[in-house]
Amino acid sequence: MAKNIVSPKKKPRRIVGVAGLPQLTYRGGPLIRNVEVTTIYWGSAWQNDPIRAQLDAFFDFIVTSSLIDQLAEYDVPGFAIGHGKHVASLIVAQDPPATVDDTAVVAFIQQQIASGAVPAQDANSLYFVFTPSGVTVTLQGSASCQQFCGYHDSHDESLLYAVVPYGDCPGCEFAGTVFDSMTVIASHELCEAITDPIPGSGWYDDVNGEIGDICEGSNKVINTVAVRAAASTTFKATVSATVVMDGSAPVNLTVTLTPSGCTPPPPPPPASPGQSYTVQTEWSNAKGACV
Ligand SMILES: [Zn+2]
């Protein structure tokens, strides 16, 4: 499809190409080299929704994760895909209308850029817009939760953006929780925006679509543990707490960290659970599989 949509229903079976497997081919357009993600939460409901902070933490991690590393097979001259940054996060408390069209989403992003509320646009900029529960996003006559669960696009082949409606509707439940469903959709759109920012002009398969479309319905869990283990050091922790009981003042905690001392090098740190995120797998030409 021209607009890269996560469809709300699992496809019965992937259509395979003549050679038996999907094959993304490069169409000569730009890729995003080092993505700079700005997350924009549209509506007052986001102010007290814990999923907002969870999504921000997800983006902090995902842009430097193995999910980006695995895209390196799609490097082309002038566009080497590397790690990115989650550069900004914004809540716009004014509520969107109950039904908001893609054209209004574009105008909304442009307004945030023009006012300086979000970073100015450059070739790496990717603006992710999240709408609150109950809001329907429409796109060329299609509606969120009916025909799609998310999409990415470019406006005037310049403004690169993705839209992820709230992931709590039947048909957009790609994982066990609303948050996990939203990270599945967001990872799908992120990888597509990087490898095909102007839809159809980057890496594309005429039969199967973009890198994420081919693997829709196939998820995996990635974990922050490798990052944390590399940075870990052993400390003794002393905690002294002052708990104010009147219910209106914060709980004060003082944590003192003391290095464990001049002992022989410690054994490798024990396995830490880290933070796990559910993402969608992406098509690998090199492996001929969703990875
Ligand atoms: Zn897609």
Image (spheres, helix red, strand yellow):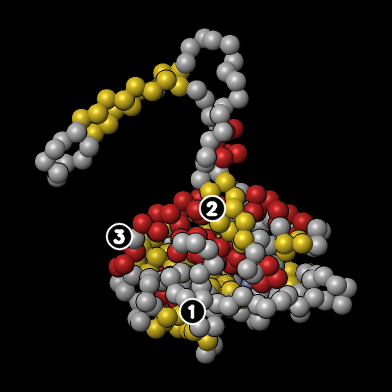
Among the two numbered marks 2 and 1 on one chain, the one whose residue lies closer to the N terminus: 1
Q: Could you classify mark 1 by the number of other residues whose Cα lies within 10 Å: few (under 14), some (14-19), or many (20 or more)?
A: many
* Residue 230 visible, this angle: yes
Number of disc labels: 3
**Residue under circle 3?**
48
> SS at mark 1?
loop
In this rendering, position of residue 287 left or right of residue 182? right
* Amino acid at circle 2: Tyr
Query: Would residue 186 be visible to someone looking at this image?
Result: no
Q: Nearer the viewer, mark 1 or mark 3?
A: 1
Identify the disc placed on residue 9.
Answer: none
As drawn, the label of residue 145 is 1
In the rendered image, which quarter contains the N terminus?
Answer: bottom right
Q: Quadrant of residue 214?
A: bottom right
In x, y percent, where is residue 153?
A: 58, 74
Q: CA distance from mark 2 to mark 1?
A: 22 Å
| Mark nearer the N terminus (1 vs 3) | 3
Q: Position of residue 201 (x, y in %)?
A: 71, 74
Query: Is there a contact, CB below 8 Å, between mark 1 and mark 3?
Result: no
Estimate the x, y position of residue 243 in percent, counting from the top left.
19, 33
Q: Residue at x 46, y 51 (%)?
A: 57
Cα–Cα gap, marks 2 and 3: 22 Å
Q: Which residue was labeled with disc 2?
A: 277
Ligand 1's image quarter is bottom right
Which residue is located at x 81 percent, y 58 percent?
287
Q: Residue 232 location, x and y as percent?
A: 53, 29
The answer to whether 100 is drawn above or below residue 127 in the figure is: below
Q: Amino acid at mark 1?
A: Cys
| Tag 2 and tag 1, C-beta contact below 8 Å | no
Q: Is residue 179 left or right of residue 240?
A: right
Q: Amino acid at mark 3?
A: Asn
Q: Quadrant of the C terminus?
A: bottom right
